[in-house]
């Protein structure tokens, strides 16, 4: 064996009881598991894991590291948490497939998530090209963690239709079908939608159904950020479940939470919808992050009509006083669709990042009202990220207990003061919700974060500590593991995770990031 991990407490991802064992790693795979009492494994190198839990590497089912993986080789925000696989292309907006026009528009639209991207050489235009770029990574060595990709429905619509709020023509719908099919054929694991983000939000149910049928035929899944997490949340969840029923497309509900005052204590209603769908045979799962505030771009709160024509058109509307007043009324009085049908409470909106360094003084402040928000949007050319303090702890705990739950950070790494979930989601589950609160047992939590997402991704050799599986592994101290990240210091690394292996190689050794770049694209297999 290249490496033997000796005397570990193995929590293998199945949800079954922990057991003591030696685990042998060879050529990037788990080569042997010898339980306590069986003959010891010989190895060229031996790691004493006494007192540590050994589990499969964690799978971040909702990541926004699309450019960060190509910008920062260390990628400590995720590697230090024990994440060994991220799912990118979320919320219907990412950087493939694109042409030159669409790329420029998408860069502007999600600058608040990933920066403007000027520091990344976007030398791809297709999904396959992006996945190839991840494989090449830094100097051909790869990237920090493995990554899967979802074809972003909003980007596809921008490419085929543009940023107008109207039904697609027959020819445009055919083109979207082809783009989705090509992305899946090139290795994407499914399709994401961002149904409160333009232009994806302009798609009606028939258009989504047509695309979901393509996804289903190719063996992928649909991952929607649905039409509301506020006033219309339960109806929006029901719409996505009905879409899955009608199309036969597997469904994974993105950051499946219930926010704003109208939804306090309503998690049981969501879980009843899920249970009814599961009883009907719908293939459904979900992910959540273990925090109450959300995070998005400031521009995303605006009404959908204000975005028509793309980012340049939105900036022009913001500069026009009469149109800006219409936007204000929608935000503060009627409840914008971008703010989930709930009138915005500016006291809940905290600036977490700006694209223009000259505006850094805004970071960490609560916006006093629309006038300040408007000025910031124009000055930062829509590149502002915000936290919204609108969630409910009871909902968070209830949803994470569900049997189809998985973990997703929804981590936006851009900005000076990001949401701490970007650096803390997985150790926060283990430290806060397992050890301190007992919401989940350790074995349950590990299954939620490993084998369950691997099953959704249809990965036959990841997510378990089992002979023949990829040696993506994490060792942590169950008595001390915790998120270091807080809202005051969101880029603080976690504690209690001394070792992380990607493809059998130490990405973190004795609590320190190594220079290993063993991550590659993980592509859907037919």
Image (spheres, grey):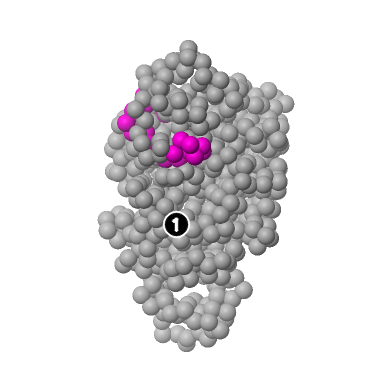
In the displayed structure image, the side of residue 155 where residue 282 appears, left or right: left
Image spot of residue 35 (x, y percent): 44, 79
- Magenta-tinted stretch: 340-360
Image spot of residue 157 (x, y percent): 63, 31
Which residue is rendered at x = 57% and y = 81% of the image?
Answer: 1
User: Residue at label 1?
Assistant: 449
Number of labels in the image equals 1
- Regarding residue 10, the answer to whether it shows in the image is yes
Which residue is rendered at x = 69% and y = 53% of the image?
Answer: 132
Which residue is rendered at x = 51% and y = 15% of the image?
Answer: 320
Q: Residues within 10 Å of mark 1 (few under 14, many from 20)?
A: many
Q: From the viewer's perspective, is residue 472 above or below residue 160?
A: below
Name the element at disc 1. helix
Q: From the viewer's perspective, is residue 24 above or below residue 348?
A: below
Which quadrant holds residue 168?
top right
Image spot of residue 149 (x, y percent): 60, 48
Which residue is rendered at x = 71% and y = 31% of the image?
Answer: 174
Q: Is residue 352 magenta?
A: yes
């Amino acid at each position: 064996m290249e490496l033997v991990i000796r005397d570990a407490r193995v929590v293998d991802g199945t949800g079954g009881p922990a057991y003591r064992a030696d685990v042998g790693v060879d050529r990037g795979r788990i080569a042997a598991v010898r339980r306590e009492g069986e003959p010891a494994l010989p190895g060229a190198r031996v790691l004493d894991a006494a007192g540590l839990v050994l589990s499969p590497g964690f799978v971040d089912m909702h990541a926004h590291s699309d450019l960060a993986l190509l910008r920062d080789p260390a990628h400590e925000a995720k590697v230090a948490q024990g994440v060994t696989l991220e799912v990118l292309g979320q919320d219907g907006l990412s950087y493939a497939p694109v042409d030159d026009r669409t790329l420029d528009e998408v860069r502007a639209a999600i600058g608040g998530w990933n920066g403007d991207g000027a520091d990344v050489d976007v030398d791809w235009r297709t999904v396959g090209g992006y996945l190839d770029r991840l494989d090449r990574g830094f100097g051909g060595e790869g990237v920090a963690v493995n990554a899967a990709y979802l074809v972003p429905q909003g980007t596809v619509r921008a490419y085929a239709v543009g940023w107008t709020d109207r039904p697609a023509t027959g020819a445009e719908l055919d083109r979207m079908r082809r783009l989705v099919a090509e992305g899946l054929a090139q290795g994407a694991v499914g399709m994401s939608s961002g149904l409160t983000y333009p232009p994806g939000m302009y798609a009606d149910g028939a258009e989504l159904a047509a695309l979901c049928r393509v996804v289903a035929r190719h063996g992928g899944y649909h991952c929607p950020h649905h039409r509301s997490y506020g006033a219309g949340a339960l109806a929006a969840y029901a719409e996505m479940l009905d879409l899955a029923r009608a199309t036969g497309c597997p469904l994974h509900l993105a950051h499946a939470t219930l926010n704003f005052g109208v939804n306090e204590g309503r998690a049981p209603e969501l879980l009843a919808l899920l249970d009814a769908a599961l009883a009907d045979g719908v293939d459904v799962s979900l992910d959540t992050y273990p925090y109450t505030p959300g995070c998005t771009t400031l521009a995303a709160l605006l009404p959908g009509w204000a975005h028509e024509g793309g980012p340049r058109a939105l900036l022009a509307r913001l500069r026009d006083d009469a149109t800006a007043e219409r936007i204000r009324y929608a935000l503060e009085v009627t409840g914008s669709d971008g703010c989930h049908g709930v009138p915005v409470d500016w006291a809940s909106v905290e600036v977490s990042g700006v694209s223009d360094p000259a505006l850094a003084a805004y970071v960490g402040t609560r916006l006093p009202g629309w006038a300040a928000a408007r000025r910031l949007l124009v000055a930062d050319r829509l590149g502002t990220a915000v936290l919204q303090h609108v969630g409910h702890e009871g909902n968070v705990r209830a949803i994470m207990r569900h049997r189809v739950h998985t973990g997703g950070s929804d981590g936006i790494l851009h900005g000076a003061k990001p949401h701490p979930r970007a650096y803390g989601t997985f150790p926060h589950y283990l430290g806060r919700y397992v050890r301190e609160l007992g919401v989940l047992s350790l074995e349950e939590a590990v299954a939620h974060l490993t084998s369950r997402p691997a099953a959704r991704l249809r990965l036959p050799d990841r997510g378990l500590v089992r002979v023949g599986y990829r040696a993506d592994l994490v060792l942590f101290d169950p008595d001390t593991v915790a998120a270091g990240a807080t809202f005051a210091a969101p880029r603080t690394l976690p504690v209690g995770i001394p070792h992380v292996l990607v493809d059998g190689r130490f990405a973190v050794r004795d609590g320190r990031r190594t220079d290993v770049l063993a991550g590659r694209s993980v592509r859907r297999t037919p």
